[in-house]
Image (spheres, helix red, strand yellow):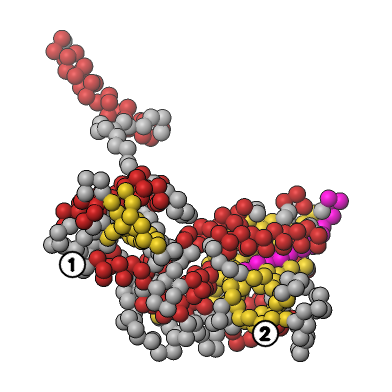
Amino acid sequence: MEVLMHLCHHRLRTLLPRTLSRACRRNHHCTPQPSHSVHVLSKPVAPTPLVSRLFQPSNLREGQEGGDMTCRSQRLMLQAGLIHSSNPGCFYYLPAALRSMEKLVRLIDEEMQAIGGQKVDMPALCGAELWKRSGRWELMGKEMFRLRDRHNIDYCLGPTHEEAVTELLASQSTLSYRQLPLLLYQVTRKFRDEQKPKFGLLRGREFYMKDMYSFDISEEAALHTYQSVCHAYGRLLDRLGLKWVQVQADTGNIGGTLSHEFHLPADVGEDCLLMCGNCGFSANFETVEPGQADCPQCHTAPLMESKGIEVGHTFYLGTKYSQVFNATFTNAQNKPAVAEMGCFGLGVTRILAASIEVLSSEDSIRWPRLLAPYQVCILPPKKGSKANEAMHLAEELVQSLGNSLLNLKGEVVLDDRTQLTIGKRLKDANRLGYPYVVVVGQKAMEEQPVFEVVCQQSGETVFLSRDGLLDLLSGAETI
């Protein structure tokens, strides 16, 4: 009997854990505990960017004209391996250019969200029905890319999204005046069937644009929003260090009753601008009476002509679209009212190319400081030279700059092509436009290391200690 009880007890001890485990799993009352220790995952550490590993294929040899290229930015961007031509008016954006564009988008996000903008993403494929309701399906003409699906339904690749965003708002039946103003924006690819694409990213068939759409309770409120966006555009261009001018403009096929363009003055610009040096009046020549020589505002001074690259455009639309699509809200009297609208565009890829166009020399790119792909390029000595021992110092400097200065994290690149002379690599660095180039040469091997620093924006060369270098680079503004 005692032996039998012992066997039963042993059997029960064996079966009970398995039975309880199955019961727990069925009833979800307990969670099996892992027998191994739990490891906390750490963030991956990005490797040091090396020039030899960067994908920057040069599409033109130095000095090559490039056929039909008629502007500086297109030639420089191709030579530097920033872009690569695909189809007419379409380009591959290569890693360095994409880094710059992502920085520009972050800057745009900051400015748009500072005035209350909320970011969305709308379909690039737009139904023809929306455009027919607004009357723009035929008005847009041949510049609109159109297609038909297998069900024989017409679509377009959106060049702009007034119809789509207004339809989106109209679908919200509970919108209250307390929720206005509402500013929705996106940064997406846009499409335009240009008859003759030219100037690289300045006039293409496929491009990136920021387009914002505002909805307000009244005309007064909508005009206040309009001015708020215009001021944000000015701040953005100021932060990029660009000279710009705001001019009155034609509303074109977008419509509305008020419009302004933002231009970077440049000889390659396709727009003719008229400005008065007396009262500050400025306009696109399309808005001025033909043959008018004096300023229509002060009538005392002649109008001066200049060329400009359009990088932004703003429109006060009123109820042009909201009336058609019945985009309404409930007002303070608890009655439905039609929203007042505005729309505001910024050419993202155009700003990128236009800034290179106006800031660069004929053979070297100069970036707005905030948009440079990398802020600092470190040049170690040539392999086999007397300063070869400084190589480890250059590698250590790359790491310490990123670790010591948070503004330079991920912003320092090492030109490890030590088979080339420092002179050759300096020439490449100058052509690519890194704001700061640090040469680690023989002076860096002294008891108190000294680094040669080339400040590309000013053209100045200085010799600094490590502390002096850190102090200089701590002021590099990044985004």
The boundaries of the magenta stretch are: 332-345
* Residue at position x 75%, y 82% in the image: 302
- Residue nearest the observer in this picture, 461 or 101: 461
Q: Give the distance between the C-alpha atoms of the residues marked 2 and 1, in whole angstroms.
A: 60 Å
Residue at image mark 2: 138
The answer to which quarter of the image holds residue 161 is: bottom right
Q: Position of residue 264 (x, y in %)?
A: 58, 73
Which sits earlier in the primary sequence, circle 2 or circle 1?
A: 2
Residue at image mark 1: 419
The nearer-to-camera label among 2 and 1 is 1
Element on which disc 2 rests: helix
Considering only vertical position in the picture, is 50 above or below 280? above
- Residue nearest the observer in this picture, 284 or 162: 284
Q: Residues within 10 Å of mark 2 (few under 14, many from 20)?
A: few
Is residue 340 highlighted in magenta? yes
Q: Position of residue 177 (x, y in %)?
A: 77, 52
Q: Amino acid at mark 1?
A: Gln
- Residue nearest the observer in this picture, 89 or 372: 372
Image mark count: 2
Element on which disc 1 rests: loop
Looking at the rendered structure, which numbered label has been put on residue 450? none
* Residue at position x 44%, y 63% in the image: 458
Q: Position of residue 232 (x, y in %)?
A: 64, 59
Overall secondary structure of the magenta stretch? strand
Q: Position of residue 266 (x, y in %)?
A: 56, 78
The answer to which quarter of the image holds residue 194 is: bottom right
Is residue 451 highlighted in magenta? no
